[in-house]
Amino acid sequence: MQYPNGLFFSDDLQKNLKEKFYHADSDPVHGKRLFFDNSGGSLRLKKCVEAKAELEAFPDCPERIHERSVYLKSVVENGTRDILEIIFGAKSGALITELTASQTMFHMVSLIMENIQGSNAVVSSIEHPSAFDAIEYYCKKTGKEMRVIPANQQTGFIDPDDVVKYVDENTCLLSVMAASNIAGSIMDIKAIVKKARQIKPDLYIISDAVQHAPHAAIDVDELGIDGMNFAPYKFFGVRGCGFAYVSDRVANLPHHKLIAKDQKVFELGTSAPGNFAAAMEIINYVCEIGKNFIQTTNKKELYDEGMKRIHLQERALLYRMLEGTYDIPGLRHIPGVTVYVDTDDLTKRDLIAAIGINGIDFTECVAEYQKRGVTVYERVNTSIYSKRIVEALGIEGAIRVSPLHCNGKDDIDEFLKITKSIAEEFAK
């Protein structure tokens, strides 16, 4: 059963999970608040921060042979394996590491577009700038045509049938993000891949999963894609690193590497073991959630179950946020509030709502929320990061509301009460 309106964690489990994050209910200087800007950078797991800090304290080089160095090297090796196999679901391929997920996207795009023949590359209109701009940059550099797939303005989706209107036998690369970072719409990547490869069987396809990875399990082998990335700092982890999977055929393309290293090694210089230790703590955390629901010692199965339960919890939170309760109206029912690119089928959405409130512009509204102890963020067409995306969705902007799975019913209810008070105040 899909649980179309989600399935809440038990109250005890939800409260236990929230305690595993730093500053979940308050800022140490500015006091109590609801942090509903997790799409901009999620709450941090305590164990992630602590694992990174612990290993950063050691001066030892992972390339030496003494005990501490050998241990640090094992953290990198085990972390690389687990990120590929458990988070990405990859049985082969290679891992690209950079300071940011945006850098990994540029890296993947450059590898394909500078080495694969073709006269055009295809990207969607709602991509994060890291994907859209990378495609545009390398189209100009390689003399290829850039083709842009429009979004469905009612749903926020990139429809598979629209994708095939832009792909042909001369397309060298297709890039479609896994989920919208404005509306939370989850793209049907599997259907997109299938339809695109019916036109060109050996087409290279990549997907930005920075928004989607913290909300549901991903499986690059099942999707059949050649590249996907995520950002640990949006996935309960730390800043300062981005990870990307690339398929064997991408890894085998010419790329920067130390000549003596294996072809599938992308790292240049000494890795930061703390970043890998922090990533493994993300995996451990999700697996611990999984253990509440299934009995197995298989780490991948536990991880997938944990992500499934996170997704169900977040769907339940989204349903409550949209529909409210008998006592508190949801966003869909508060006079003066508009939910943009809203869709009924919540099984195809991550925990994000894009809203507006009559009588107040988006930036001022965010400030009003802040006065009332709620952290949200505006995505508007005056921002270089947002202009193309919001206009592709047919709107001038939106207030992006993005709680996290560790939030509870009471957090959502408090947010709805505050939203209603703002709407009432500015309706006057």
Image (cartoon, rainbow, N blue to C red):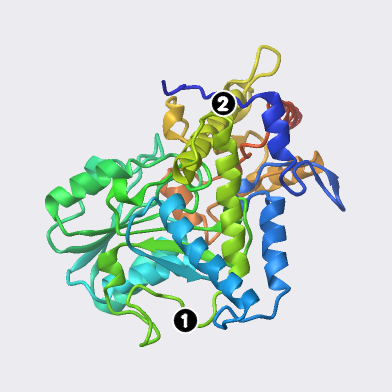
Above or below for 56 versus 290: below
Q: Is residue 334 left or right of residue 397?
A: right
Query: Residue at 43% across / 44% down in the picture?
Result: 393
Which x, y percent locates residue 9? 62, 27
Q: Which of 394 and 350 is in front in this view?
A: 350
The amino acid sitting under disc 1 is Leu
Pointer 1 residue: 268
Residue 73 can be seen in this image: yes
Which residue lies most toward the bottom here?
259
Q: Position of residue 48 (x, y in %)?
A: 66, 56
Q: Is residue 170 left or right of residue 329?
A: left
* Quarter placement of the N terminus: top left
Residue positioned most to the top: 326
Instruction: Name the residue located 22 percent from the left edge and 41 percent from the top edge.
Output: 161
Q: Which amino acid does label 2 sit on?
A: Ala
Look at the numbered disc 2 and give the secondary structure of its residue.
helix
Q: How many marks?
A: 2
Cα gap from disc 2 to disc 1, whole angstroms: 43 Å
Q: Is residue 106 above or below residue 343?
A: below
Assign a secondary structure to mark 1: loop
As rendered, which of 343 and 396 lies closer to the eye? 343
Q: Callout 1 environment at 10 Å: few (<14), some (14 to 19), or many (20+)?
A: few
Q: Horizontal and vertical percent for residue 270?
A: 54, 80
Q: Tell me what residue is drawn at x 56 percent, y 43 percent.
A: 286
Residue indicated by mark 2: 316
Note whether residue 101 is visible: no
Q: Residue 54: give its label.
A: none
Q: Residue at left 69%, top 72%?
A: 56
Q: In this view, does 338 lie above or below 378?
A: above
Observer-nearest of 415 and 4: 4
Q: In front of the other: label 2 or label 1?
A: 1
Where is residue 398? Give x, y as percent: 57, 43
